[in-house]
Image (cartoon, rainbow, N blue to C red):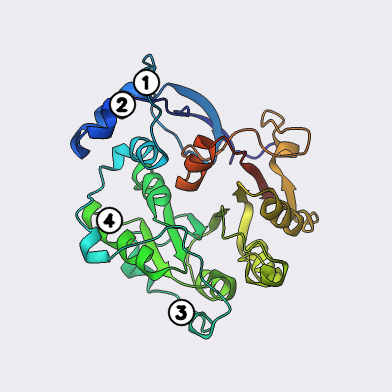
Amino acid sequence: MASSLCLHLQTCSHLGCIAAAKAAAPSMVATANKSLCPFLKRPFLPNFCLPSGSSADLCERQPLRSPELVALEYADLNLSHKIFEEAGHVRVRQHVNPLSSSFSVPTPAPNWDEVFKDPKLPLMVDIGSGSGRFLLWLAKKHLDSRNFLGLEIRQKLVKRADIWVKELGFSNVHFMFANATISFKQIISSYPGPLMLVSILCPDPHFKKRHHKRRVLQKPLVESIVDSLMPGGQVFIQSDVLEVADDMRLWFDSEANVLKHIDKLDRSLLCDKDGWLLKNPMGIRTEREIHAESEGSNVYRRMYQKYT
């Protein structure tokens, strides 16, 4: 029987184009977003929902660039762009070497009572949280029912995300500068509530074979995730690089004695002939996902659920 963790929700379909949005002020983006986003049903997790919006005809003008599409998709966060001077220039896709000595010391767990209003709520952890918009969007939708933790190895991204958290006044989301490969277990083992979901979305590919050991997903992290998940907890992975997606898939498929792919538990969640989920089940696309799809690339997704 499918777990109650997977439900249906309504969310934005891929955004179209409006040339006027390019010149729109930040205060006008939310209005543009509402007029552009037809909603469709997507599967998701426990009690996660998104309200319906109105539909509108898409204009037939010059397509928006991916940064503009990101701004539209995350428009309801109404994030300030004045913070960049304080946080410094940030390259979201900048690659770092997680094996360097500067990342070799495990990050200690925070004081959970200080970072979350209610530290016993079910927790979602996003490994490689990037800019943080993805978690901030989820946190806004579930202020009183879920906590969200972003682990990111690029310190400037964490600094900027922290500024946004303070600006928004959210008490259910926290970002940490950490090498998740070596710090995940130490951080999560002290969390007083259940771990309900772990996501690893479009991690650094490290294409060269000799650099594969730098990839975030290694055996110790896989084991820590599986051991830490609550019964019924889920793992969501995706990448626009098939080789990376296949690599992550092999790691979690190897835990078949504990994890089942979600389409085996819920037949309504459709996969292609190779077993990749056809739709994003999270209710919002990541920035990298928006960029990849705007370029016509495929995104490869899998979701697993822990059973006993």
Disc 1: which residue: 61
Q: Which of 105 and 224 lies nearest the eye of the viewer? A: 105
Q: Is residue 293 left or right of residue 165?
A: right
Disc marking residue 28? none
Q: Which of 72 and 88 lies nearest the eye of the viewer? A: 88
Q: Residue at x 52, y 69 (%)?
A: 188
Query: Which mark is first along the chain, 2 or 4?
Result: 2
Q: Residue at x 25, y 42 (%)?
A: 78
Relative height, residue 183 to residue 31 (above, below): below
What number of labels is visible? 4
Q: Give the distance between the C-alpha atoms of the residues marked 3 and 1, in whole angstroms.
A: 51 Å
Q: Give the distance between the C-alpha atoms of the residues marked 3 and 2, in whole angstroms.
A: 47 Å
Disc 2: which residue: 19
Query: In this rendering, which labeled residue sits more in front, label 1 or label 4?
Result: 1
Q: Secondary structure at mark 1?
A: loop
Disc 4: which residue: 164
Q: Which of 55 and 145 lies nearest the eye of the viewer? A: 55
Q: Secondary structure at mark 3?
A: loop
Relative height, residue 224 to residue 104 (above, below): above
Residue type at tag 4: Trp
Q: Residue at x 32, y 66 (%)?
A: 159
Disc marking residue 108? 3
Query: Which mark is first along the chain, 2 or 1?
Result: 2
Residue type at tag 2: Ala
Query: Which percent across, then down, holds residue 80?
Result: 22, 49
Query: In this rendering, which labeled residue sits more in front, label 3 or label 4?
Result: 4
